[in-house]
């Protein structure tokens, strides 16, 4: 089942034409990498998926059954509720525990039953191996642990797609592998994962579909032999 379908899409950042004539397709359970140098348009492309950036002059742009060319602002929250979004800087609330971070998200997205909330929190923390960190404050956790909590938070609403913008960018190689391994396992349950990365080694260890942003174009390079210089300045 197709979850994302872009055809001849154009991505702009203010007046700058970031990517042109984008053809981009993601199916249920697919594991997709977006690679490219800094400023090539990876984050901009991801932002269009959850309507942080608008698409212009676009032939087709569908995400989770919504037409992004005609979607109204009031419809965006329900779209985002079906997604899990993970950022490089974690974006945890630092004034509350891991448990209360999770409660905040569930309350904000309409979970009224307390026992159902607690059950879901326990499920996602167990999934990422963080059950014993439930009452910790974010500053008491390592970078890798905070990113695992960010993944758990992204899973709370049973998302159909996880969008991860450089989720391993601030992590050491071993921790980065651990994080991608968790995301790869999640994709095997049917949730599509779309992540941007600079780490070519991860692509070889955890194969998936690979798109490259370069010179204003998005190209499927899954079957090409990639080198570090393809993503580094």
Image (spheres, rainbow, N blue to C red):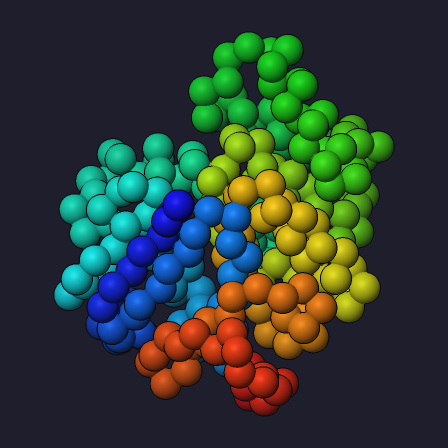
Measured from the top left, where is residue 223 in percent x and y?
Answer: 52, 78
Quarter of the rendering containing residue 229: bottom right
The vertical placement of 194 against 217, above or below, is above
Say whether residue 50 is left or right of residue 139.
left
Quick one: 179 or 86, which is closer to the camera? 179
| Count of picture labels | 0
Q: Quadrant of the C terminus?
A: bottom right
Q: Residue at x 21, y 43 (%)?
A: 71
Q: Where is 27 relative to 210, above or below?
A: above
| Residue 203, image x, y percentages | 63, 70
Please say whether residue 113 is visible from this viewpoint: yes
Q: Give the percent coordinates (x, y) of residue 117.
A: 60, 18
Q: Residue at x 65, y 39 (%)?
A: 152
Q: Nearer the viewer, residue 56 or 140?
A: 56
For image coordinates 17% across by 62% down, the residue present is: 59
Task: Using residue 158 as the reference point, say whether residue 2 is left or right of it.
Answer: left
Residue 12 visible, this angle: no
Residue 108, position as x, y percentages in the image: 47, 25
The quarter holding residue 8 reads bottom left
């Amino acid at each position: 089942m197709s979850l994302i379908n872009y055809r001849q899409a154009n991505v702009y950042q203010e007046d700058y034409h970031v990517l042109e004539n984008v053809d981009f397709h993601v199916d249920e359970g697919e594991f997709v990498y977006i690679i490219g140098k800094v400023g090539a348009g990876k984050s901009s492309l991801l932002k269009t998926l959850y309507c942080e950036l608008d698409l212009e002059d676009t032939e087709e742009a569908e995400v989770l059954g919504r037409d992004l060319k005609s979607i109204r602002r009031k419809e965006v929250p329900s779209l985002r509720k079906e997604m899990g979004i993970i950022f490089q800087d974690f974006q945890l609330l630092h004034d509350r525990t891991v448990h209360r971070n999770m409660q905040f998200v569930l309350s904000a997205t309409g979970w009224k039953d307390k026992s159902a909330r607690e059950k879901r929190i326990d499920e996602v923390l167990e999934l990422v191996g963080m059950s014993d960190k439930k009452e910790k404050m974010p500053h008491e956790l390592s970078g890798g642990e905070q990113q695992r909590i960010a993944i758990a938070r992204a899973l709370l609403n049973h998302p159909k797609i996880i969008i991860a913008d450089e989720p391993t960018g601030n992590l050491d190689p071993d921790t980065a592998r651990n994080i991608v391994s968790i995301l790869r396992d999640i994709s095997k349950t049917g949730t599509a994962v779309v992540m941007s990365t600079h780490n070519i080694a991860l692509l070889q260890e955890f194969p998936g579909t690979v798109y490259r942003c370069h010179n204003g174009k998005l190209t499927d390079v899954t079957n090409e032999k990639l080198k570090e210089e393809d993503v580094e300045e």
